[in-house]
Protein backbone atom coordinates (compact mmCIF):
# COMPACT_ATOMS: atom_id res chain seq x y z
CA UNK A 1 0.00 0.00 0.00
CA UNK A 2 1.36 3.39 -1.01
CA UNK A 3 1.58 5.86 1.88
CA UNK A 4 2.48 8.98 -0.08
CA UNK A 5 1.03 10.31 -3.28
CA UNK A 6 3.13 11.03 -6.33
CA UNK A 7 3.09 14.60 -7.64
CA UNK A 8 0.68 13.71 -10.45
CA UNK A 9 -1.68 11.91 -8.02
CA UNK A 10 -1.51 14.87 -5.63
CA UNK A 11 -2.32 17.40 -8.38
CA UNK A 12 -5.22 15.30 -9.65
CA UNK A 13 -6.60 15.04 -6.11
CA UNK A 14 -6.34 18.82 -5.59
CA UNK A 15 -7.48 20.01 -9.05
CA UNK A 16 -9.79 17.19 -10.04
CA UNK A 17 -7.92 16.87 -13.34
CA UNK A 18 -4.49 15.44 -14.19
CA UNK A 19 -1.31 17.50 -14.14
CA UNK A 20 -1.15 19.63 -17.30
CA UNK A 21 -4.81 19.09 -18.26
CA UNK A 22 -6.62 21.87 -20.10
CA UNK A 23 -8.67 22.98 -17.11
CA UNK A 24 -6.06 22.48 -14.41
CA UNK A 25 -5.48 26.20 -13.75
CA UNK A 26 -9.20 27.01 -13.89
CA UNK A 27 -10.00 24.22 -11.44
CA UNK A 28 -7.23 25.32 -9.08
CA UNK A 29 -8.46 28.93 -9.05
CA UNK A 30 -12.10 27.93 -8.68
CA UNK A 31 -11.45 25.48 -5.86
CA UNK A 32 -9.01 27.74 -4.02
CA UNK A 33 -11.00 30.95 -4.23
CA UNK A 34 -14.27 29.17 -3.43
CA UNK A 35 -12.82 27.29 -0.46
CA UNK A 36 -14.95 27.22 2.67
CA UNK A 37 -12.06 28.44 4.85
CA UNK A 38 -8.67 30.08 4.50
CA UNK A 39 -6.78 26.87 5.42
CA UNK A 40 -8.67 25.06 2.65
CA UNK A 41 -7.83 27.90 0.26
CA UNK A 42 -4.17 27.02 0.83
CA UNK A 43 -4.96 23.34 0.48
CA UNK A 44 -5.98 23.97 -3.13
CA UNK A 45 -3.64 26.85 -4.05
CA UNK A 46 -0.66 25.92 -6.22
CA UNK A 47 -0.71 22.14 -5.73
CA UNK A 48 2.78 21.63 -7.19
CA UNK A 49 4.40 24.05 -4.71
CA UNK A 50 2.19 22.66 -1.92
CA UNK A 51 3.28 19.12 -2.70
CA UNK A 52 6.96 19.93 -2.25
CA UNK A 53 6.44 22.13 0.80
CA UNK A 54 4.31 19.48 2.47
CA UNK A 55 6.71 16.68 1.66
CA UNK A 56 10.01 18.46 2.33
CA UNK A 57 9.19 21.04 4.99
CA UNK A 58 5.94 20.57 6.91
CA UNK A 59 5.93 16.78 7.37
CA UNK A 60 9.53 16.55 8.58
CA UNK A 61 9.11 19.52 10.94
CA UNK A 62 5.82 18.16 12.32
CA UNK A 63 7.67 15.04 13.47
CA UNK A 64 9.24 17.00 16.35
CA UNK A 65 7.21 20.24 16.64
CA UNK A 66 3.49 20.88 17.15
CA UNK A 67 1.49 21.01 13.90
CA UNK A 68 0.61 24.70 14.31
CA UNK A 69 4.32 25.54 14.50
CA UNK A 70 5.11 23.30 11.53
CA UNK A 71 2.44 25.15 9.53
CA UNK A 72 3.85 28.56 10.50
CA UNK A 73 7.43 27.52 9.69
CA UNK A 74 6.28 26.12 6.34
CA UNK A 75 4.69 29.46 5.45
CA UNK A 76 7.88 31.26 6.52
CA UNK A 77 10.06 28.93 4.42
CA UNK A 78 7.77 29.48 1.42
CA UNK A 79 7.98 33.24 1.92
CA UNK A 80 11.77 33.10 2.24
CA UNK A 81 12.02 31.11 -1.00
CA UNK A 82 9.85 33.72 -2.73
CA UNK A 83 12.10 36.48 -1.30
CA UNK A 84 15.19 34.70 -2.63
CA UNK A 85 13.66 34.26 -6.10
CA UNK A 86 12.68 37.93 -6.33
CA UNK A 87 16.06 39.03 -4.94
CA UNK A 88 17.84 37.03 -7.65
CA UNK A 89 15.73 38.65 -10.36
CA UNK A 90 16.06 42.17 -8.95
CA UNK A 91 19.70 41.74 -7.86
CA UNK A 92 18.90 43.23 -4.46
CA UNK A 93 17.91 41.91 -1.05
CA UNK A 94 14.16 41.51 -0.57
CA UNK A 95 12.38 40.85 2.72
CA UNK A 96 8.68 41.12 2.01
CA UNK A 97 7.28 37.68 1.26
CA UNK A 98 8.58 36.08 4.46
CA UNK A 99 6.59 38.35 6.82
CA UNK A 100 3.59 38.38 4.45
CA UNK A 101 3.46 34.60 4.25
CA UNK A 102 4.04 34.45 8.01
CA UNK A 103 0.99 36.66 8.50
CA UNK A 104 -1.08 34.40 6.26
CA UNK A 105 0.23 31.40 8.21
CA UNK A 106 -1.03 32.98 11.44
CA UNK A 107 -4.45 33.48 9.82
CA UNK A 108 -4.49 29.81 8.78
CA UNK A 109 -3.56 28.69 12.31
CA UNK A 110 -6.16 30.98 13.93
CA UNK A 111 -8.82 29.87 11.43
CA UNK A 112 -8.12 26.24 12.29
CA UNK A 113 -8.06 26.90 16.04
CA UNK A 114 -11.39 28.73 16.04
CA UNK A 115 -13.04 26.61 13.34
CA UNK A 116 -13.70 29.57 11.05
CA UNK A 117 -15.77 28.31 8.12
CA UNK A 118 -17.93 30.13 5.58
CA UNK A 119 -18.84 27.09 3.51
CA UNK A 120 -22.58 27.84 3.65
CA UNK A 121 -22.06 31.07 1.71
CA UNK A 122 -22.28 31.30 -2.10
CA UNK A 123 -19.04 30.79 -4.07
CA UNK A 124 -18.63 34.52 -4.82
CA UNK A 125 -18.84 35.43 -1.12
CA UNK A 126 -16.31 32.73 -0.19
CA UNK A 127 -13.99 34.03 -2.91
CA UNK A 128 -14.33 37.57 -1.62
CA UNK A 129 -13.55 36.47 1.96
CA UNK A 130 -10.47 34.50 0.84
CA UNK A 131 -9.26 37.45 -1.23
CA UNK A 132 -9.92 39.75 1.73
CA UNK A 133 -7.62 37.62 3.90
CA UNK A 134 -4.88 37.79 1.26
CA UNK A 135 -5.25 41.52 0.62
CA UNK A 136 -5.53 42.47 4.29
CA UNK A 137 -2.43 40.44 5.19
CA UNK A 138 -0.62 42.11 2.28
CA UNK A 139 -1.72 45.57 3.47
CA UNK A 140 -0.72 44.79 7.06
CA UNK A 141 2.73 43.65 5.91
CA UNK A 142 3.15 46.78 3.75
CA UNK A 143 2.06 49.06 6.63
CA UNK A 144 4.39 47.33 9.07
CA UNK A 145 7.34 47.63 6.70
CA UNK A 146 6.55 51.31 6.07
CA UNK A 147 6.45 51.96 9.82
CA UNK A 148 9.74 50.14 10.29
CA UNK A 149 11.36 52.22 7.51
CA UNK A 150 10.09 55.43 9.11
CA UNK A 151 11.41 54.51 12.54
CA UNK A 152 14.88 53.59 11.19
Image (cartoon, helix red, strand yellow):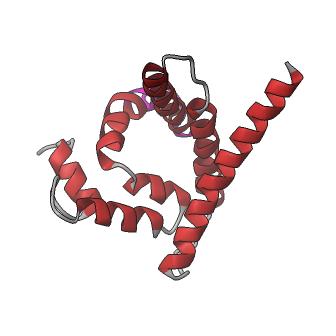
Residue 151 in which image quadrant? top right
| Residue pictured at 43% horizontal, 26% vertical | 85
Answer with left or right where residue 81 lies relative to residue 128: left
Q: Is residue 66 above or below residue 134?
A: above
| Residue projecting furthest to the left | 1
Answer with left or right where residue 104 lies relative to residue 58: right
Q: Is residue 117 visible?
A: no
Task: Tell me which segment is drawn in magenta.
Answer: 60-68
Residue 82: x, y in percent?
47, 31
Foreground pick, 116 / 7:
7
Q: Is residue 104 above or below residue 73?
A: below
| Residue pictured at 66% horizontal, 58% vertical | 114
Quick one: quadrant of the N terminus?
top left
Q: Is residue 107 visible?
A: yes
Answer with left or right where residue 43 lies relative to residue 8: right
Quick one: quadrant of the C terminus?
top right
Residue 101 in which image quadrant? top right
Residue 107: x, y in percent?
63, 49
Residue 58 in which image quadrant? top left
| Residue pictured at 41% horizontal, 53% vertical | 43
Is residue 18 located in the magenta-colored stretch of the structure? Answer: no
| Residue pictured at 62% horizontal, 64% vertical | 116
| Residue projecting furthest to the front | 90
Residue 126: x, y in percent?
54, 72
| Residue projecting furthest to the right | 151
Amino acid sequence: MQTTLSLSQYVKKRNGVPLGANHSMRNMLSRALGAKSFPIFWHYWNPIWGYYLSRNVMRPISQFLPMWLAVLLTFLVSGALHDIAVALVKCQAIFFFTPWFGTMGVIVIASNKYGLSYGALPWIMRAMINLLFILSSFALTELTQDLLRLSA
